[in-house]
Amino acid sequence: MNSLDYKATLDYLFSQLPMFQRTGPAAYKNTLKNTLKLDECYGHPHRKYRTVHVAGTNGKGSVSHMLASVLQAAGYKTGLYTSPHLKDFRERIKINGQMMPESAVVDWVGNFKANNELWKIQPSFFELTVAMAFDYFAHQEIDVAVMEVGLGGRLDSTNIITPDVSIITNIGLDHTNLLGDTLEKIAGEKAGIIKEEVPVVIGTTQSETVPVFNAKAQEVGTSIYFADQEYNVAYSMLSIDGKQQLNVQKQGKDAFPELALDLLGQYQHKNIPAVLSAVNLLNEKDYKISEDNLRAGLSNVVSNTGLLGRWQVIGNNPLTVCDTGHNEDGIKSVVQQLKNTAYKQLHFIFGTVGDKDPGKVLALLPKQASYYFVKADIARAMDAAELAKRAKEFGLIGQVYSSVNEAYEKAKSCADKNDMIFVGGSTFVVAEVL
């Protein structure tokens, strides 16, 4: 295979199929018709291995990667499907941390296009990518796949699976134009992944969403577990090897002292209970995951799965960090972490998408920072000058740059070794820096 074949394949996927990342709500399908048709055409591949399903507004990517890492450490051949990707399309489809080979992507898409002369399906980018993951995992004879929901839950293409465990991390106001404008409505969409006799773990107890999840679990006749009522991180510290050392309690008593986690964001304290509850339930379903497997998996998430962009340190002197948190709750967590980080001056490279009002996010950002406003290289991104104008209303002052990389180079040249550079606001801004 030459690299031109792969480039042409990506061009077909990215340019010729409706893609939410590029065009936003116009690419969202409010039906599973195409997904079910594709599934039938490929012989229901997702039925050939076990699955775990992960939804939520924030944290679902981290939880998916942590669980995949733990399953790998326990000796399972583990598929991992996540979205969006940051640098390479193939980050979406991995087995034991290895991305689907370029040649396999080219062959699969080529076969689809040939077969589709007869099938006449018009899938979105996401629908086709999920079908590719299901089929690739089946051909590779994996043991289990961790499937991360793309958007919502009820109508998401991943929602045709019957998993061993379902997980919903938390609910925040995001994609309100598609999922609803209240936490209750959004929870209703996420609750669409709760299935008959499949236990569901809820990561964060929220008064608005508890009745929604309880009602759905009762309706389909399954058990529901609120992870944060069982486990909590009592405290954490950074160890010499640069990992978080967590002291995790179970109902007030020490359960996992000195649990090492190589993901550094403090917001992972909210995600760990969901992972621990899910592992308990998997073990009840005949999985064999020991405490040693659990500890090894959590200590090596990045090396086992290749996770990018979660409070990722990409430079020192000045400390340079990127994070993909982009909605109100995600930015709250980022700002909290910034408050707990020592630096002289903060240089903040910031961009966002244009189809969401940035006001609530801008209101949260620290005023004592130098801002570098940017527009990521996608059609959905908000114009940098427009963003700077909106930011000024919230007392955030900075300069506009013509590209993410220009802003990054400028920040590096302006920052003192005791300063901090932070890159975020949008997954797409982080992707360009990485």
Image: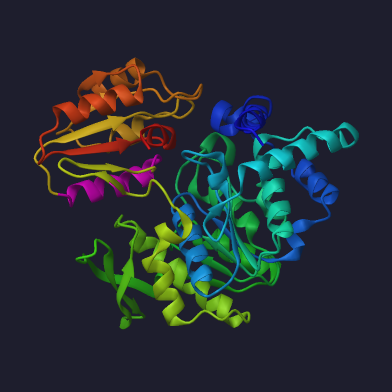
Dominant SS of magenta comes to: helix
Examine the rendering and report whether any part of residue 117 can be seen: yes
Q: Is residue 336 magenta?
A: yes
Q: Which residues are magenta?
A: 325-341
Position of the N terminus, as image quadrant, is: top right
Is 191 located above or below residue 35 in the figure?
Answer: below
Q: Is residue 372 magenta?
A: no
Q: Residue furthest front?
A: 2
Could you say where residue 257 lies in the image, as x and y percent from the top left? Answer: 29, 79
| Residue nearer the viewer, 44 or 173 | 44
Residue found 68% across the figure and 29% down from its top = 17
Q: Describe residue 59's horizontal placement relative to residue 22 as left or right.
A: left
Residue found 42% across the figure and 28% down from its top = 357
Could you say where residue 311 lies in the image, as x and y percent from the top left? Answer: 32, 49
Could you say where residue 187 lies in the image, as x and y percent from the top left? Answer: 54, 52
Residue found 36% across the figure and 59% down from its top = 268
Q: Describe residue 39's horizontal placement relative to residue 65 as left or right.
A: right
Is 126 located above or below residue 53 in the figure?
Answer: above
Q: Describe residue 9's horizontal placement relative to residue 271 as left or right.
A: right
Is 151 located above or below residue 276 in the figure?
Answer: above
